[in-house]
Image (spheres, rainbow, N blue to C red):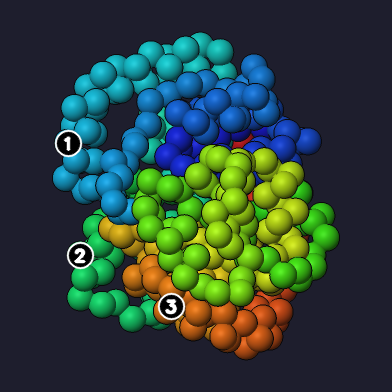
């Protein structure tokens, strides 16, 4: 089959998991990709000659959270130009490649292109859990607006797909049809990583989103923190700051005794798979991150920090044995279930042609 795969450019989680799926699909199918920003650059290196560049959405961040108004203003400002550029991109695609089916990882323009062509569209992502499931977590007053906003975005960004495959590390009640759970989509490097529990804690957080990160960690005595995200190599108290290296990061992740991070799905799902207790302090105004952190705490896999401070980190570390015991009960056979579910759907659509 000819498959067109859409990947958002915001964040790298979409790109890394899409790489896994695309690599699998290329064994049997002809796959082309549309993406934007950093995700386009990453995927274009992985699949040269198969990736088209489009324009996508980008969030505006300040003080560890999303600036909703400025993000909206930026989208409005860029929309006319981006719409014109995407029209040119899809016009080129239409001349070179006519897909039998479209797969989207929450990318809207490729979804609209599928509707224009009247071909089936499958959504593979983790975010649609918000709109297609009943969440069993407490919603504080300050999160209700973010929840309703996220639910509305999910409802209208890729509506009425033929199928939804929802990647998740937790269970929830599915309330909409044509929806199936799949486990987190994992890189081969994570699946093949040798797990150990050494005396360090891996920390991932960009310096711009948590300005007091090093100060807080230095208040936690007797611990060794390996910190990624600041893009420097230096030692500051009990923190060893490291420039990013995929090989080094995965090794430090796999051998850590615990993880401290925001609420990003990709790292959390990798940590769950590797059975690493997680202390999560989600980026504000991003409900998906709040949801991930809340479920980590609900499952007793770790602690959800509403405010990042040394008291919360110390409380998390005091319960590591309990968190480790619970998270060790999580089981997943790599990506086999995901590949099987997707292959079965493609087989059905192939035989409908």
Residue depicted at 47% across the width and 58% down the height: 214
Question: In the orientation shown, which residue stands out farthest toward the front?
Answer: 237
Looking at the picture, does residue 257 appear above or below residue 23? below
Please, what secondary structure does the residue beneath circle 1 have?
helix
Q: Which residue is mark 1?
A: 73
**Secondary structure of the residue carrying numbered label 3:** helix
In front: 65, or 112?
65
The quadrant where residue 193 appears: bottom right
Q: Nearer the viewer, mark 1 or mark 3?
A: 3
Q: CA distance from mark 1 to mark 3?
A: 35 Å
x, y (%) of residue 314? Answer: 50, 79
CB under 8 Å between callouts 1 and 3? no
Residue in front for this viewpoint, 50 or 73: 73
Query: What element does badge 2 sit on?
Result: helix
Q: Earlier in the sequence, mark 2 or mark 3?
A: 2
- Total residue callouts: 3
Q: Which mark is residue 145?
A: 2
- Percent across and percent down for residue 351 are 67, 42
Residue of label 3:
312
Graded by Cα atoms within 10 Å as few (under 14), some (14 to 19) or many (20 or more), the crowding at tag 2 reads some
Q: Earlier in the sequence, mark 1 or mark 2?
A: 1
Q: Which quarter of the rendered picture does the C terminus lie within?
A: top right
Q: Are marks 1 and 2 in contact (CB under 8 Å)?
A: no
| Residue found at x 29% / y 41% | 60
Mark 2 to mark 3 CA distance (whole Å): 25 Å
Q: Nearer the viewer, residue 95 or 64?
A: 64
Q: Quadrant of the N terminus?
A: top right
| 331 versus 30 height, above or below | below
Mark 3 residue crowding within 10 angstroms, few (<14) / some (14–19) / many (20+): some
Residue 76's x, y, as percent? Answer: 18, 32
1 or 3: tag closer to the N-terminus: 1
């Amino acid at each position: 089959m000819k498959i067109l795969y859409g990947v958002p450019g915001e964040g790298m989680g979409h790109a890394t998991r899409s790489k896994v799926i695309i690599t699998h699909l290329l064994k049997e199918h002809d796959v082309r990709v549309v993406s934007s920003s950093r995700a386009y650059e990453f995927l274009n290196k992985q699949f040269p000659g198969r990736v088209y560049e489009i324009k996508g959405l980008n969030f505006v961040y300040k003080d560890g959270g999303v600036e909703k108004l400025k993000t909206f203003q930026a989208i409005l400002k860029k929309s006319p130009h981006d719409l014109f550029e995407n029209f040119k991109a899809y016009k080129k695609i239409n001349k070179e490649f006519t897909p039998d089916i479209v797969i989207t990882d929450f990318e809207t323009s490729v979804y609209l292109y599928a509707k224009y062509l009247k071909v089936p569209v499958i959504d593979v992502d983790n975010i649609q859990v918000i709109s297609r499931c009943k969440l069993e977590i407490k919603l504080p007053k300050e999160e209700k607006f973010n929840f309703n906003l996220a639910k509305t975005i999910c409802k209208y960004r890729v509506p009425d797909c033929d199928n939804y495959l929802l990647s998740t590390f937790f269970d929830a009640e599915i309330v909409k049809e044509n929806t199936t759970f799949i486990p987190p989509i994992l890189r081969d490097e994570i699946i093949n990583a040798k797990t150990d529990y050494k005396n360090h804690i891996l920390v991932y957080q960009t310096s711009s989103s948590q300005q007091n990160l090093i100060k807080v960690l230095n208040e936690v005595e007797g611990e060794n923190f390996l910190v990624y995200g600041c893009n420097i190599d230096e030692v500051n108290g009990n923190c060893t700051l490291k420039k990013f290296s995929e090989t080094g990061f995965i090794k430090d992740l796999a051998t850590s005794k615990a993880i401290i991070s925001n609420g990003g799905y990709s790292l959390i799902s990798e940590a769950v798979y590797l059975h690493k207790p997680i202390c999560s302090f989600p980026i504000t105004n991003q409900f998906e991150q709040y949801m991930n952190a809340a479920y980590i705490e609900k499952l007793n896999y770790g602690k959800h920090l509403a405010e990042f401070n040394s008291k919360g980190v110390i409380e998390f570390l005091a319960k590591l044995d309990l968190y480790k015991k619970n998270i060790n009960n999580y089981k997943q056979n790599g990506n086999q279930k995901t590949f099987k579910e997707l292959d079965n759907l493609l087989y059905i659509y192939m035989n409908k042609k």
